Image (tube, helix red, strand yellow):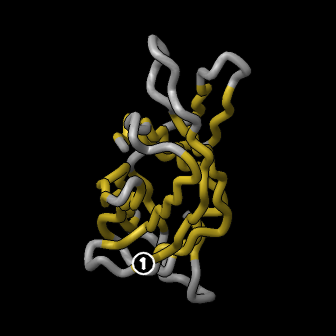
């Protein structure tokens, strides 16, 4: 399996022709304090399968912080049909909206995708504290 696209955005939709419309792609957020909550974001992964990877294929994407601590996990399966001669490799397009994502501290976060028996580094996100931010009043702030 090859990971041909991974990104974080505000929203994404797949068109009937297979194209993906992406709105507001980003790789950095600021928060007034920590822990911080991102109310909504969407993650996109496009996986391209090798000819010998057919049938039911499992995948797992973990959002981890800089220490490797797991923040959230997306798991699923996809059915990969055999490819006929002259056709493009089979692709799985995962467009996953996420809600209420909690970032416990400032720093680098990344998605790691386990699929096709291999671990792939995917998109990353840096979350920083806004300068001169007021201290949190309830222990949690929105990003």
Q: Is residue 90 above or below residue 65?
A: above
Q: Position of residue 35 (x, y in %)?
A: 49, 80
Residue at 45% x, 11% y is 86
Q: Is residue 1 above or below residue 90?
A: below
Q: Position of residue 128 (x, y in %)?
A: 36, 64
User: Does 3 sit left or right of 12 as displayed?
Assistant: left
Looking at this view, name the residue that lies furthest to the left: 67
Looking at this view, name the residue that lies furthest to the right: 16
Find numbered disc 1 in the image and state the secondary structure of the residue it sits on.
strand
The C terminus appears in which quarter of the rendering?
bottom right
Residue at 59% x, 32% y is 23
User: Mark 1 highlights which residue?
Assistant: 70
User: Does 84 sit left or right of 3 as displayed?
Assistant: right
- Snapshot quadrant of residue 20: top right
Residue at 48% x, 38% y is 46
**Dot 1, crowdedness within 10 Å: few (<14), some or many (≥20)?**
some
């Amino acid at each position: 399996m090859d990971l041909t696209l991974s990104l974080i955005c505000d929203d994404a939709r797949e068109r009937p022709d297979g194209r993906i419309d992406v709105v507001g792609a980003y790789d950095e957020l600021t928060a007034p304090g920590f822990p911080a909550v991102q109310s909504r974001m969407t993650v996109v992964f496009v996986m391209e399968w090798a000819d010998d990877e057919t049938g039911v294929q499992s995948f797992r994407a973990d959002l981890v912080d800089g220490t490797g601590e797991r923040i959230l996990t997306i798991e699923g399966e996809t059915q990969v049909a055999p490819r006929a001669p002259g056709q493009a490799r089979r692709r799985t397009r995962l467009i996953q909206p996420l809600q209420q994502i909690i970032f416990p501290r400032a720093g680098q976060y990344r998605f790691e995708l386990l699929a096709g028996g291999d671990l792939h580094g995917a998109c990353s996100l840096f979350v920083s504290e806004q300068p001169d931010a007021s201290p949190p009043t309830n222990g949690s702030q929105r990003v």
